């Protein structure tokens, strides 16, 4: 096959879109579709190699794998090695362990499966995953493995011409499944070969069923239409679009038309700049994402100004000094020991595996960092995971208070217990993550045990066993009504609220404040009938993992402020606070305000005496929650 300048230019259009999207998604909201364009190109080229060889009976499976490894593994191995060395000095143990796991999985090209079990490609937390972009390399490699095997197997039983029909059938089956799987669970579908194979197979169909254009204007028009479809997808598709469902047809079909047209003289595609970027495209793709994460990790301002040029520079250097190395190709499985990329793969895999097994080697970090990070595990040792299990702290025969709520209730339960003499007095807790106690509330979490637990809570409140025992209601109402608070910290959207009262799906998108107030009032008045009742105002949410950020500050010599502005706390919680005050007043319920303890001088503290008071971004640790003990003691022991 002659060198395809149009395909080389198309690579440039694809990789530039991906890079721009990752550094500044506002500029090119659908730039992620550049990966879909890459899949079409890969499918076309690999199908041409496989079918040309099969037709001539010259196709060698080992040689094919060897060629793919020569191209893909060296750059990937170099990037992984650089990250592991960098991580040893600049990444905290828990995150270094995660990096090592990503290196291990990407080395064997199954990282897409690992990432499919996360929060989704567009989730803010994914910006901390240094090798997230390797999901597409894993998908391509899996395609390289299985597609030729299927063709070689079927060739024994059907005519060569019918193999083309098989590819057409596989394309249709994969596309139909993609549409279904994306609708059912787009976060998982995004990463899998089964939902992406059709994009590569469509590229293969461009080779198997070529069109002979009758005239040049038709050829040019076809190519231009393909360009328009791709550009339109870059600007009018966004991370709100279910992907890769039927909408992915827009950029994929656009790439298909460009490949099919085979027109080489369009200056938009075939120009010196795109010619070079197209050649460097694989290396640019491999190196750009770690640069994106680097900027996110160190909170660099306007990082795109440096990150985009650096991506191109590293892509050029990687192409010149790694990709252009002419590794020998071998034809026999007996010669696998001669394949140098195999040893690169093996070394990187073993390094990743070893670091993962040893938990990121925390021993090599300064003791101060290790002590700070221990706060992540400093949670309530008396937690009960069973809905039907009574949970006590202190003397269970002399209960002085009952704590009811979600994980925030669990995180401050020992602070309540410390308000009493633990030897002679105790408290009972009915706390479970994601389960606030609000009558008639539904929790949008699959398989939640909250409805059963709330039934138990209602029965306990109505029973005479603990009559007149004070009840303290504690919950992270902001996440239940507003969603995660990543939006304020990163500018990217968080998930929708977890708690809702109406069955209409659309109602869950906005806070149901009026329904919340109505049902919270009902809950408080019901509880206050037989119990002195207290309710806690929202605990300040930092929006960042306090122990990790403090450890990063020390490790990297930074002074990033981990405290939360009190004005930011009020901006997020003010309406909820007013509802709590209003409902409590109606029901003669006492309101306790942790911000009166944790916030002063327009900031809510993240540390006390140099130690984190949170174990993550919103749960107080066992050390930090004791700051609230005097507040509980004054309220419960007047």
Image (cartoon, rainbow, N blue to C red):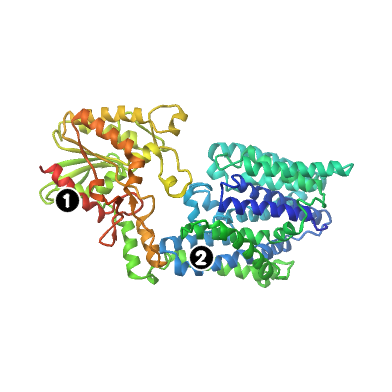
Residue extending farthest to the right is: 214
Rendered residue at 37%/66% (across/down): 554
Rendered residue at 54%/68% (across/down): 82
The percent coordinates of residue 524 (x first, y second) are: 23, 31
The percent coordinates of residue 142 (x first, y second) are: 63, 54
Tell me the residue that label 1 is attached to.
418
Q: Contact (CB < 8 A) between labels 1 and 2? A: no
Q: Nearer the viewer, mark 1 or mark 2?
A: 1
Number of callouts: 2
- Quarter of the picture holding the C terminus: top left
Q: Is residue 259 left or right of residue 191?
A: right
The percent coordinates of residue 320 (x first, y second) are: 69, 69
Answer whether residue 149 is visible to the viewer in this image.
Answer: no
Question: Between residues 99 and 257, which one lies in front from this camera angle?
Answer: 257
- In the picture, the disc for residue 352 is 2
Secondary element type, mark 2: helix
Q: Is residue 303 above or below residue 583?
A: below
- Quarter of the picture holding the N terminus: bottom right
Secondary element type, mark 1: loop
Answer whether residue 485 is visible to the viewer in this image.
Answer: yes
Q: Is residue 88 left or right of residue 596?
A: right
The percent coordinates of residue 345 (x first, y second) are: 60, 66
The residue carrying pointer 2 sits among few (fewer than 14), some (14 to 19) or many (20 or more) residues within 10 Å by Cα, namely many
Q: Is residue 576 left or right of residue 355?
A: left
Sequence-wise, the earlier of marks 1 and 2 is: 2
- Quadrant in the picture for residue 64: bottom right
The residue carrying pointer 1 sits among few (fewer than 14), some (14 to 19) or many (20 or more) residues within 10 Å by Cα, namely many
Give the CA distance from mark 1 to mark 2: 44 Å
- In the picture, the disc for residue 593 is none
């Amino acid at each position: 096959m002659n060198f395809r300048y149009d395909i080389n230019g198309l690579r440039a259009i694809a990789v530039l879109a991906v890079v721009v999207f990752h550094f500044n998604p506002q500029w090119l909201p659908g730039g992620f579709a550049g990966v879909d364009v890459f899949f079409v190109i890969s499918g076309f080229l690999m199908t041409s190699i496989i079918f040309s060889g099969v037709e001539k009976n010259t196709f060698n499976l080992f040689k094919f794998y060897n060629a793919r490894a020569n191209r893909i593994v060296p750059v990937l191995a170099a990037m992984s090695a650089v990250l592991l060395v960098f991580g040893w000095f600049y990444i905290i143990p828990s995150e270094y362990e995660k990096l090592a796991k990503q290196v291990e999985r990407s080395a064997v090209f199954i990282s897409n499966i690992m990432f499919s079990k996360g929060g989704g490609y567009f989730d803010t937390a994914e910006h901390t995953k240094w090798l997230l972009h390797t999901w597409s390399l894993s998908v391509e490699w899996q395609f390289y493995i299985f597609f030729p095997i299927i063709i070689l197997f079927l060739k024994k039983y059907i005519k060569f011409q019918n193999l083309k029909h098989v590819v057409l059938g596989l394309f249709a089956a994969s596309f139909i499944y993609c549409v279904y799987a994306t609708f059912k669970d787009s976060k998982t579908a995004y990463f899998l070969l089964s939902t992406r194979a059709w994009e590569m197979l469509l590229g293969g169909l461009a080779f198997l069923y070529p069109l002979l254009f009758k005239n040049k204007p038709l050829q040019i028009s076809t190519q231009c239409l393909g360009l328009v479809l791709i550009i339109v997808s870059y600007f009018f598709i966004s991370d709100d679009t279910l992907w890769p469902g039927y909408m992915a047809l827009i950029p994929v079909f656009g790439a298909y038309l460009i490949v099919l047209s085979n027109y080489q003289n369009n200056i938009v595609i075939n120009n010196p700049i795109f010619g070079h970027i197209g050649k460097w495209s694989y290396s640019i793709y491999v190196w750009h994402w770690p640069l994106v994460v680097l900027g996110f990790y160190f909170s660099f301002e306007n990082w795109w100004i440096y990150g985009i040029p650096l991506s191109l520079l590293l892509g050029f250097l990687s192409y010149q000094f790694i990709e252009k190395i002419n590794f020998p190709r071998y034809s026999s499985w007996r010669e696998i020991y001669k394949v140098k990329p195999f040893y690169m793969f093996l070394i990187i895999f073993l390094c990743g595996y070893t670091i993962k097994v040893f938990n990121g080697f925390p021993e090599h970090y300064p003791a101060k960092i290790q002590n700070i990070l221990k706060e992540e595990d400093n949670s309530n040792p008396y937690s009960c995971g069973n809905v039907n299990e009574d949970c006590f702290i202190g003397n269970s025969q002399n209960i002085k208070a009952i704590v009811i709520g979600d994980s925030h209730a669990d995180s401050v339960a020992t602070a309540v217990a410390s308000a009493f003499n633990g030897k002679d007095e105790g408290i009972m807790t009915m706390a479970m993550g994601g389960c606030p106690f609000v009558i008639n509330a539904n929790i949008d979490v699959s398989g939640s045990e909250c409805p059963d637990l709330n039934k138990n809570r209602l029965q306990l409140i109505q029973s005479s066993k603990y009559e007149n025992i004070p009840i303290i209601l504690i919950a992270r109402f902001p996440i239940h009504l507003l969603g995660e608070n990543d939006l304020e910290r990163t500018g990217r959207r968080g998930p929708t609220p977890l708690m809702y009262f109406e069955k209409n799906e659309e109602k869950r998108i906005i806070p149901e404040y009026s329904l919340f107030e109505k049902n919270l009032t009902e809950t408080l008045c019901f509880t206050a009938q037989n119990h002195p009742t207290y309710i806690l105002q929202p605990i300040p949410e930092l929006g960042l993992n306090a122990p990790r950020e403090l450890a990063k500050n020390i490790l990297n010599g930074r002074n990033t402020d981990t405290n939360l502005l009190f004005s930011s706390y009020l901006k997020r919680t003010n309406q909820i606070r007013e509802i709590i005050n209003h409902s409590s007043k109606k029901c003669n319920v006492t309101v306790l305000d942790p911000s009166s303890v944790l916030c002063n001088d327009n900031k809510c503290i993240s540390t006390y005496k140099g130690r984190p008071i949170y174990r993550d971004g919103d749960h107080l640790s066992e050390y930090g929650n004791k700051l609230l003990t005097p507040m509980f003691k004054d309220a419960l022991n007047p």
